[in-house]
Image (cartoon, helix red, strand yellow):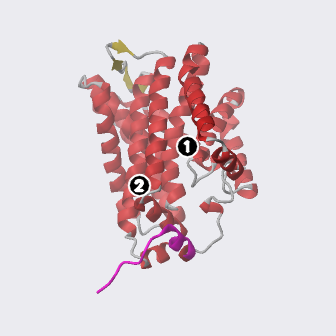
């Protein structure tokens, strides 16, 4: 279906495609003007937030074959970084964003480096443990994080002298970073770095034999995914105006993971659709929230059984591709390093 839509759209005249893009952009930008309900805008903001979060996890799990389930830990680092700097030290929100992203990327690198010899369930356990360690640090380091009481009254960001407080205003921030993430990641995946990531996912030994430095590219991949998770956390902190460790439980990590799996790992559009589906399910299952994770688990099992590449995954999705790693490496244009 994805291929059919792409083919149909590419066959349209250029003027028609530009018109469709223009109308779509106008509609997206005007959504807060038509939807005045703060409840609905809140749901849309969460969908946009999780596009970046689930997408950044998808970069790690879907494009190098590593399996991290501790993304809530990276989310927490970015969130607390902005909360602490803006509340305790009166830093401007916009200055805290790059710091939160870079700090989270560095921590992601430190977590990843000792685990590169691990695969599958072992790597998953390490990332899960990291996430829980971050949550416990946030819970117990009272002097820095506020401990169980958290950090309250996080200052609202300002833009052109105006305070951004309403969900309709935050919508544009979440939208900006979701679009920026998709555009930048699309460019990265089409570069040599992205091709190296995909080759590692398909066949590590074949990739290494053709000159791909596994440790280098895995480290870059983990740091890149963590960077965007940190940025998402930094934006989320002033939006909720209050941060505590309960936000970053294991449930949150599995929530992010479910979006990537259900939408389709190894595809840019998968986490977008997965974020929409899971957040809508969140609202529909609110009356029976105690069984929410059971429903997610069943949905993931069904997806893995019926459509392992996810809802949006198509026949050209490399996760559903049955070609050998060596053939895929040749198609990706990765050449063997010359030796003396």
Residue 216 drawn above or below residue 170: below
Q: Is residue 2 left or right of residue 28?
A: right
Of helix, strand and loop, which one carries label 1?
Answer: helix
Residue 301 drawn at (x, y percent): 71, 53
Is any atom of residue 4 visible in this view?
A: yes
Of helix, strand and loop, which one carries label 2?
Answer: helix
Q: Residue at x 67, y 51 (%)?
A: 310
| Residue farthest left in this picture | 89
Residue 40 drawn at (x, y percent): 61, 20
Looking at this view, is 232 or 141 the one in front?
Answer: 232
Residue 153 drawn above or below residue 211: above
The nearer-to-camera label among 2 and 1 is 2
Q: Which residue is mark 1?
A: 256
Q: Give the class, few, some or many, for how many residues have Cα within 10 Å of label 2's Cα (few <14, many ≥20).
A: many
Q: Give the class, few, some or many, for how many residues have Cα within 10 Å of label 1's Cα (few <14, many ≥20).
A: many
Quadrant location of residue 76? top left
Q: Is residue 113 left or right of residue 181?
A: left
Residue 279 drawn at (x, y percent): 62, 33
Residue 165 drawn at (x, y percent): 43, 15
Looking at this view, is 57 or 119 the one in front?
Answer: 57
Asked whether 83 falls inside the magenta stretch, the response is no
Looking at the image, tell me whether mark 2 or mark 1 is earlier in sequence order: 2
Labelled pair 2, 1 in contact (Cβ < 8 Å): no
Asked whether 338 falls inside the magenta stretch, the response is yes
Q: Which residue is mark 2?
A: 222
Q: Residue at x 42, y 69 (%)?
A: 117
Magenta part of the chain: 327-340
């Amino acid at each position: 279906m994805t291929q059919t839509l792409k083919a149909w759209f590419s066959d349209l005249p250029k003027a028609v495609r530009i018109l469709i893009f223009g109308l779509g952009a106008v509609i997206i930008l005007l959504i807060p003007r038509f939807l005045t309900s703060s409840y609905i805008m809140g749901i849309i903001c969460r969908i946009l937030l999780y596009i970046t979060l689930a997408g950044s996890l998808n970069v790690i799990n879907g494009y190098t074959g590593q399996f991290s389930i501790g993304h809530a830990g990276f989310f927490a680092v970015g969130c607390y970084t902005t909360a602490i700097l803006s509340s305790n030290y009166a830093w401007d929100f916009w200055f805290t964003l790059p710091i939160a992203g870079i700090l989270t990327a560095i921590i992601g690198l430190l977590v990843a480096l000792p685990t590169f010899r691990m695969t599958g369930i072992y790597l998953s356990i390490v990332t899960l443990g990291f996430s829980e360690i971050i949550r416990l640090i946030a819970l117990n380091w009272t002097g820095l994080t506020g401990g169980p009481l958290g950090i309250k009254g996080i200052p609202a960001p300002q833009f052109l002298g105006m305070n951004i407080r309403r969900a309709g205003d935050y919508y544009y921030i979440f939208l900006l970073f979701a679009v920026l993430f998709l555009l930048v990641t699309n460019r990265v995946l089409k570069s040599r770095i992205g091709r190296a990531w995909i080759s590692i996912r398909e066949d590590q030994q074949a990739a290494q034999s053709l000159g791909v430095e596994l440790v280098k590219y895995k480290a870059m991949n983990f740091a890149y995914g963590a960077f965007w998770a940190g940025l998402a956390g930094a934006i989320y902190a002033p939006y909720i105006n209050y941060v505590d460790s309960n936000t970053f439980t294991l449930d949150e990590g599995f929530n992010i993971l479910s979006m990537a799996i259900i939408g389709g790992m190894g595809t840019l559009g998968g986490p977008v659709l997965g974020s929409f589906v899971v957040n809508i399910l969140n609202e529909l299952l609110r009356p029976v929230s105690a069984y929410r994770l059971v429903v997610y688990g069943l949905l993931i099992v069904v997806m893995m059984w019926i459509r392992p590449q996810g809802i949006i995954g198509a026949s050209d999705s490399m996760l559903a591709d049955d070609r050998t790693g060596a053939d895929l490496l040749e198609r990706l244009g990765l050449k063997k390093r010359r030796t003396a």
